[in-house]
Image (cartoon, helix red, strand yellow):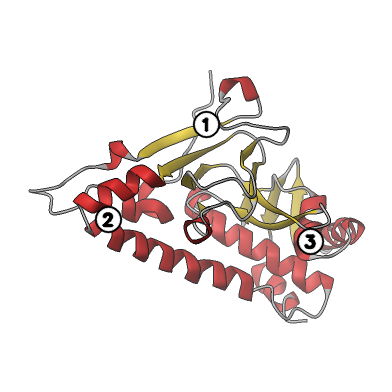
Amino acid sequence: MPITKQYVNCNSCSMQAICQPIGSKEQALDLTSNYLTRHVEVNTDQSSSPQLTQAIGVRLFEQEQPLTAIYAVCSGTFKLCQRTAAGVEKVVGFRFPGELMAEDALYLAKYNYSAIALGDNSVCQVFIEQFSACSKLAPELQHNLIQLLTKQSFEQQHNTQVLIGKKSAESLLVAFLLNICQRSAKHSGSATELELSISRHDIASFLGIRRETVSRLLSKLQQEQLITLHNKQLSLLCLESLKKLTES
C-alpha cells in the first residue's frame, strides 16, 4: 500500500496569511488560484518535476537567479546555501514544514541563497508577479503580506538568537538540536522526535565546526542517554539535561 504523504496543516503554515480567501465568510474573495500553486512535489527523481529540480541536489531555486516566487515548505526539509566570492558554498540555514523560503528576495529581486531539498519534499509557491497584480485589486493582500514578512522576520531572529553566544561546540550543537525539533513540531506534533535528514557535514557547515566534532558529540550524547539517533530518527530523551548543556 503506498504511503500517503503528510503535509503541514495550513493553519500552522507561515504562508497562511496570503493563501486564504479575504473578506468575511459571507463575502469572501478567493484570488489564490491566480498566484498560488499548492503541494508542488520536489522529488529526487528529477524527471518527475523538471521545472523545479534543476540540478544535482534537487535545487528549488539558485542564488542570484531573478525572483519569480516565494515558497512555503509543505513537507520535508530544505537546506539553504550561499556561495561566497571565492566560490565556496556554505550552509546558512534550514527550513522545515510551515516555514518560508526566499522572502528576502522580495527586496533584492533575486534569490539570496540556493534552496536544496533533502529528500522528496514539497512546497507551496506564490508567484510574485501574479500576486502583485491581484493585490492591486484587493489591497488587503498587501497588508497580509507585510504581516507575513514581519512574523517570519521575528521567527528567524529567534532561531538565530538561540545559537548566539554558546561557549562550546557541545552547547552549540545541543541548542541546534533543540531548536530544529521545536520548529518541526508544528508538522510532526512532537518537540522531541525528528527525522534528521540533515547530514553531519551540513550541520557542521551551518554551525561552523568540524564534521568530526559533530559526529563525536552526537556519539557522546547517545552514550550519556540524552538522545538516540537510529536510521535518521532523532529522539531527545531528557530535555532538562539538554537545556542545561546549552548554558555550559
- Seen in the picture, residue 227 relative to 6 is either above or below; the reply is below
- Percent coordinates x, y for residue 94 in the rendering: 64, 54
Please report whichever mark, 2 or 3, sits nearer to the chain's N-terminal start.
2
Q: Nearer the viewer, residue 40 or 106?
A: 106
Residue at screen point 65% across, 68% down:
239
In the image, taking residue 63 as reference, residue 226 lies left or right, namely right
Specify few, some or many for label 1: CA neighbours under 10 Å numbering under 14, 14-19, or 20 or more: some
Please report whichever mark, 1 or 2, sits nearer to the chain's N-terminal start.
1
- Seen in the picture, residue 23 relative to 208 is either above or below; the reply is above
Marks 2,3: beta carbons within 8 A: no
Kindly identify which residue carries mark 2.
141
- Percent coordinates x, y for residue 65 in the rendering: 60, 45
Q: Quadrant of residue 156?
A: bottom right
> Label 2 vs label 3: CA separation?
49 Å
Going by the numbered disc 3, the residue's amino acid type is Gln
Nearer the observer: mark 1 or 3; the answer is 1
- Percent coordinates x, y for residue 127 in the rendering: 41, 42
> Label 1 vs label 2: CA separation?
26 Å
Residue at screen point 53% across, 59% down:
108
Kindly identify which residue carries mark 1.
41
Q: Is residue 19 visible?
A: no
Residue at screen point 42% across, 68% down:
150
Q: Secondary structure at mark 2?
A: helix
Q: Secondary structure at mark 1?
A: strand
Kindly identify which residue carries mark 3.
225
